[in-house]
Amino acid sequence: MGKLLSIEKAGKARFFCVRAVHPCPQGGLSAQLGDQLNLHACAQRDLCHAEGAACMRALLGAEDLAQQLQVSRTSIWKGIQTLEKKGLVIESARHHGYKLLEGDLLVPSQLSQDLNIPVFYHDQSQSTQMDAKLGIDHNHPTPALYLAPHQEAAKGRYGRPFYAAKTGGIYMSLHLAPDVPLTEFKPYTILVAAAIVKTIQELTQLPVQIKWVNDIYLQGKKVAGVLTEAISSMEAQTVTDVIIGVGINFHLPSFPKDLAKKAGNLFQEPPTITRQELIRAIWNNFFQSSEEELMAIYKENSLVLGKQVSFVRQETTYQGLATQVTDAGHLVVRLEDGQEKILSSGEISLSSWSDFPPHE
């Protein structure tokens, strides 16, 4: 367990850096309390997850926290209450202090610094896709990330409702302004899905896979999804703006009954990383990885390639073998009669998939 050594005050902005012998993660209670009190908790980046987990569960006395953050005990108490309202589960032991049991806090200012792009955080959000569209109307710079702890009216593909829990999820949208001809539009859904898979595998070693075209699966259940919306100029035949929405079931407390059998969590047990770490790494991988690398990752981690699939087109159900994902993001399916169908992400949705052909 990390023992806090010193607190350094820097400048007029009430900036505090909490240094530890064994570094505590950004998700640690003192760090999150500092952020809540408009202080900045400075945490080491090269974290040992085992040490981090122990540190997050340390019992911290109110007096110690007050001294570390140079605020009153009343401020600590109010800060704890606010953190609980934001979804953190904190144990209060009389005369002993506080212990973080579950949850973490998103710090948009730190994300903005780490990613070197603006990050707009909305406590109350209908959807981050809508937030990004409003950002376009207000001439926000690009690229820009829109982030929310919860969404009141989240939508998936084809306008379907998307379940967004009050706590434990990641809901974000990236706004880009490519301004390219329609023929040069990149398969952003595939590229971001691949960046998500690459990041999760790097940070957790969890065997996540991609169900064409936009869903991330873990052990047979959907844990994340990607939604890409493009704004085009028909006169100029260009795509001016792209909004890429991402929803991740990081560590949700529960699911509605109708979703419980098909939706799952990235972490069933207490997470070994924070949401902040995952968000930062996803977008770093997206920006820094080549399109060729991400496309290769997408194909290598496909849940449907080499499997029997069925899909519906113009009210007709087809069955066949998924043989290829093209560089444009299209799925090639060889039907039972030998014909090949090329499916674009915008026109169909896979209805089922299996390892073996259906029985006669």
Image (cartoon, helix red, strand yellow):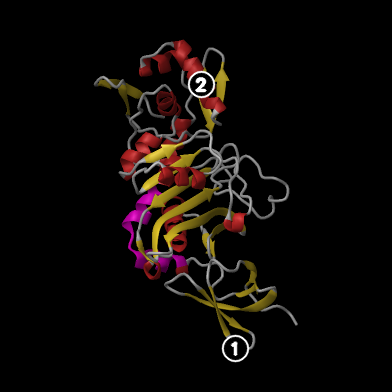
Q: Is residue 13 above or below residue 140?
A: above
- Name the amino acid, label 1: Gly
Q: Is residue 288 magenta?
A: yes
Q: Is residue 222 above or below residue 94?
A: below
Q: Residue at x 44, y 25 (%)?
A: 36
Farthest residue to the front: give it: 235
Please report the bounds of the magenta region as a residue range: 280-298
160 horizontally vs 174: left or right = right
79 horizontally vs 43: left or right = right
Q: Is residue 276 above or below residue 344?
A: above
- Name the amino acid, label 2: Ile
What residue is disc 2 on?
80
Q: Nearer the viewer, residue 343 or 94?
A: 343
Q: Nearer the viewer, residue 158 or 117?
A: 158
Q: Which element carries disc 2, helix, strand or loop? A: helix
Residue 287: image quadrant is bottom left
The crowding category of the residue bearing disc 2, from other C-alpha atoms within 10 Å (few below 14, some 14 to 19, many at least 20), is: many
Q: CA distance from mark 2 to mark 1?
A: 64 Å
What residue is disc 1 on?
338
Q: Is residue 24 above or below residue 234?
A: above
Q: Residue at x 63, y 54 (%)?
A: 160
Q: Which element carries disc 1, helix, strand or loop? A: loop
Q: Nearer the viewer, residue 20 or 156?
A: 156
Q: Is residue 127 magenta?
A: no
Query: Where does the image place residue 31, in percent across and percent down from the top left?
Result: 40, 28
Q: Look at discs 2 and 1 and give the one toward the viewer.
A: 1
- Report if the CB atoms under discs 2 and 1 are less than 8 Å apart: no
Query: Where does the image place residue 355, in percent across and percent down from the top left?
Result: 62, 73
